[in-house]
Amino acid sequence: MRILVANDDGVGRGLAAVVRECLVRGHEVVVATTEGQRSACSKAVAFRTRYRVSELMGCPAVIVDSTPASAVAVALEVFEGCCEVVVSGVNEGPNLGLWDILSSGTVGAALEGALRGLRGIAVSLVARRRSEYQLLPDGAFREAAQIALNVLEMLPSSWPVPALNLNVPAFG
């Protein structure tokens, strides 16, 4: 499968976990991310944005000085036909309630792909408290990435909805 991996946390543990899991499973990967933390910017897209084409973890990448949805939009233009699905995350924080979902940059990146005719999954790691994320082992992000890819690989090629929002508990 050809997967565009995106995130609103920049190049962090969540993005790395998804890229690694995709590569281990033999998927083709293109990365689209922000230069730094860009949470809570929803599906905002800038009409003009600075970006650079690079390589992350051996994969072609676009890194933008803008929003996660802009990163997806730029990547889909730069790497035309690069993918069939967008996996956004693993986000550090839940996207559970209406405010979270409508505000989330992670969800916004998946929705940008969906609006362009691709399937999208937003995946978030849910800890009990915000302070716990720094203490979580990399394995928690890896497990969330594995669950997201398991869900993706089980779905039929045509989903009944354009995007999914998956929240994985980091406890228990």
Image (cartoon, rainbow, N blue to C red):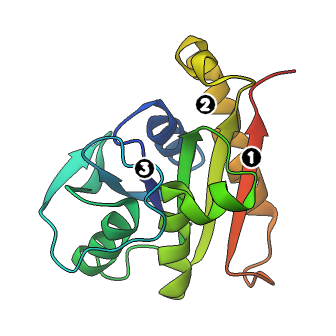
As displayed, is residue 13 above or below residue 54? above
Q: Quadrant of the N terminus?
A: bottom right
Contact between marks 1 and 2 (CB within 8 A): the answer is no
Given residues 60 and 75, the one toward you in this image is: 75
Rounded to the nearest angstrom, the CA distance separating label 3 from label 1 is 15 Å
Residue labelled with disc 3 = 8
Residue 84 in sight here: no
Q: Amino acid at mark 2?
A: Phe
Amino acid bearing label 1: Asn
Q: What is the three-letter code of the residue carrying label 3? A: Asp
Q: Which class describes the residues within 10 Å of circle 1: few (<14), some (14-19), or many (20+)?
A: many
Corner quadrant of residue 125: top right
Residue topped by disc 1: 167
> Where, quadrant-wise, is the C terminus in this rendering?
top right
In contact (CB < 8 Å): disc 3 and disc 1:
no
- Which mark, residue 30? none
Which mark, by number, is residue 141?
A: 2
